[in-house]
Amino acid sequence: MKSKQEIEEEGQALSQNEGICGNVKLCCLQPLLEVTIQEAEAQPFEVLMQFLYTDKIKYPRKGHVQDVLLIMDVYKLALNFKLSRLEQLCLQYIEASVDLQNVLIVCENANKLQLDQLK
């Protein structure tokens, strides 16, 4: 994947070579759109985007601590973006996955994420 700087440099090179590029150079020179989302890690955001495009989420393995924590992060994003269906799917997964081995870690993470309703 190319960085923003590499794409801009290619756009400048294309604009200097008008014979090859023609009108295409105009689209190459426009800046890339960057959107910064506060408090969102890459993996939970990827799950959220998958949900937006497919209306479902691919559930990780039940009971594994890291997977439960991932879905808790997705749940926090669902609350922030007011995606009630995703909230419900996350809650179902979390409730089905909490057991004696991971309950303390899940409660600590719920406290850290300020998800009092999960505790």
Image: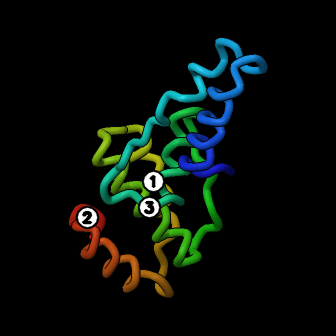
Which secondary structure, mark 3? loop
Crowdedness near tag 3: few (<14), some (14–19) or many (≥20) residues, C-alpha within 10 Å: few
Sequence-earlier tag: 1 or 3? 3
Q: Is residue 83 left or right of residue 116?
A: right
Whole-number angstrom distance, CA of label 1 to CA of label 3: 16 Å
Q: Position of residue 27 (x, y in %)?
A: 58, 22
Sequence-earlier tag: 2 or 3? 3
Above or below: residue 103 compared with residue 42 = below
Sequence-earlier tag: 2 or 1? 1
Query: Residue drawn at (72%, 20%), measured in percent from left and top?
Result: 21
Task: Tell which residue pokes out farthest to the top in this image.
Answer: 23
Q: Is residue 29 left or right of residue 94?
A: right
Circle count = 3
Whole-number angstrom distance, CA of label 2 to CA of label 1: 13 Å
- Viewer-side residue, 89 vs 100: 89
Q: Position of residue 72 (x, y in %)?
A: 41, 63
The residue identified by callout 3 is 41
Q: Nearer the viewer, mark 2 or mark 3?
A: 3
Whole-number angstrom distance, CA of label 2 to CA of label 3: 17 Å
User: What's the image's color scheme?
Assistant: rainbow
Q: Position of residue 88 (x, y in %)?
A: 41, 46
The residue identified by callout 2 is 115
Query: Residue drawn at (76%, 17%), measured in percent from left and top?
Result: 19
Which secondary structure, mark 2? loop
Crowdedness near tag 2: few (<14), some (14–19) or many (≥20) residues, C-alpha within 10 Å: some
- Viewer-side residue, 41 vs 60: 41
Q: Amino acid at mark 1?
A: Cys
Query: Residue drawn at (58%, 46%), measured in percent from left and top?
Result: 57
The residue identified by callout 1 is 90
- Viewer-side residue, 33 vs 49: 33
